[in-house]
């Protein structure tokens, strides 16, 4: 894949705000397989309001919506604080992307961000190359 082209901070700074312009097709450069891969298609067709839980470290994509009915998706990403401290998570064996989403997480009880010293253990040096965009807190 060409995941090395993706930097989370660069994406937030230059690409995220244009998402509404890419409803029918997305022309923004994003990492993808560079050689044919053996596909094991699993298409989940779930009822309205259903929840699908999976690790973002798994290869995944959406399929075109041919139903004629609008489809809305809400994306929630979660971490467990003990896993953050231990750097424990799903194996991510083939990603060379840079940046970290760790600054985006907030505690559900009071909306406080993860402690800076904890987040700092995930920094890879690109945070000083890019303007780190942290979303405003309510």
Image (cartoon, rainbow, N blue to C red):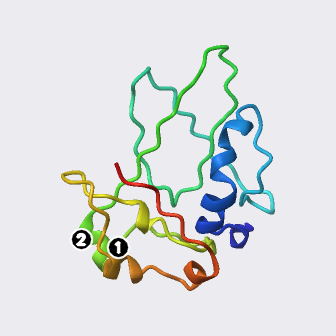
Q: Give the percent coordinates (x, y) of residue 84.
A: 32, 72
Q: Which mark is residue 31?
A: none
Q: Could you give the CA–CA distance between mark 2 and mark 1, rounded to whole angstroms? A: 8 Å
Looking at the picture, tell me which residue is in the foreground, 121 or 67. Answer: 121
- Could you tell whether 17 is left or right of 57 in the image? right
Q: Residue tagged by mark 1?
A: 88
Give the quadrant of the N terminus: bottom right
Q: Give the percent coordinates (x, y) of residue 33.
A: 74, 60
Please rate how many residues cluster around mark 2, counting C-alpha atoms within 10 Å: few if below 14, some from 14 to 19, many from 20. few
Please report the residue visible at 59 percent of the width from the left and 67 percent of the height from the top: 9
Please report the residue visible at 55 percent of the width from the left and 78 percent of the height from the top: 127
Is 130 above or below relative to 24?
Answer: below
Q: Are marks 2 and 1 in contact (CB under 8 Å)?
A: yes
- Could you tell whether 123 is left or right of 138 in the image? right
Looking at the picture, tell me which residue is in the foreground, 87 or 36. Answer: 87
Q: Give the percent coordinates (x, y) of residue 11.
A: 64, 60
Q: Tell us which disc is closer to us: 2 or 1.
A: 2
Q: Secondary structure at mark 2?
A: helix
Sequence-first disc among 2 and 1: 2
Is 110 above or below relative to 134?
Answer: above
Please rate how many residues cluster around mark 1, counting C-alpha atoms within 10 Å: few if below 14, some from 14 to 19, many from 20. few
Q: Secondary structure at mark 1?
A: loop
Looking at the picture, tell me which residue is in the foreground, 36 or 80. Answer: 80
Please report the residue visible at 73 percent of the width from the left and 38 percent of the height from the top: 22
Q: Residue furthest top?
A: 68
Looking at the picture, tell me which residue is in the foreground, 130 or 119. Answer: 130
User: Looking at the image, how many numbered discs can be counted on the residues?
Assistant: 2
Q: Residue tagged by mark 2?
A: 82
């Amino acid at each position: 894949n060409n995941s090395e082209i993706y930097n989370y901070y660069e994406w937030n700074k230059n690409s995220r705000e244009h998402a509404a312009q890419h409803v029918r097709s997305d022309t923004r450069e994003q990492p993808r397989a560079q050689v044919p891969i053996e596909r094991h298609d699993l298409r989940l067709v779930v009822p309205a309001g259903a929840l699908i839980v999976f690790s973002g470290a798994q290869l995944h994509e959406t399929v075109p919506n041919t139903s004629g009915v609008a489809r809305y998706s809400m994306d929630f990403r979660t971490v467990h604080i003990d896993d953050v401290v231990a750097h424990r998570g799903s194996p991510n064996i083939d990603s060379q992307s840079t940046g970290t989403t760790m600054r985006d997480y907030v505690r559900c009880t009071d909306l406080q961000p993860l402690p800076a010293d904890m987040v700092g253990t995930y920094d890879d040096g690109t945070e000083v190359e890019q303007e780190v965009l942290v979303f405003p807190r309510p």
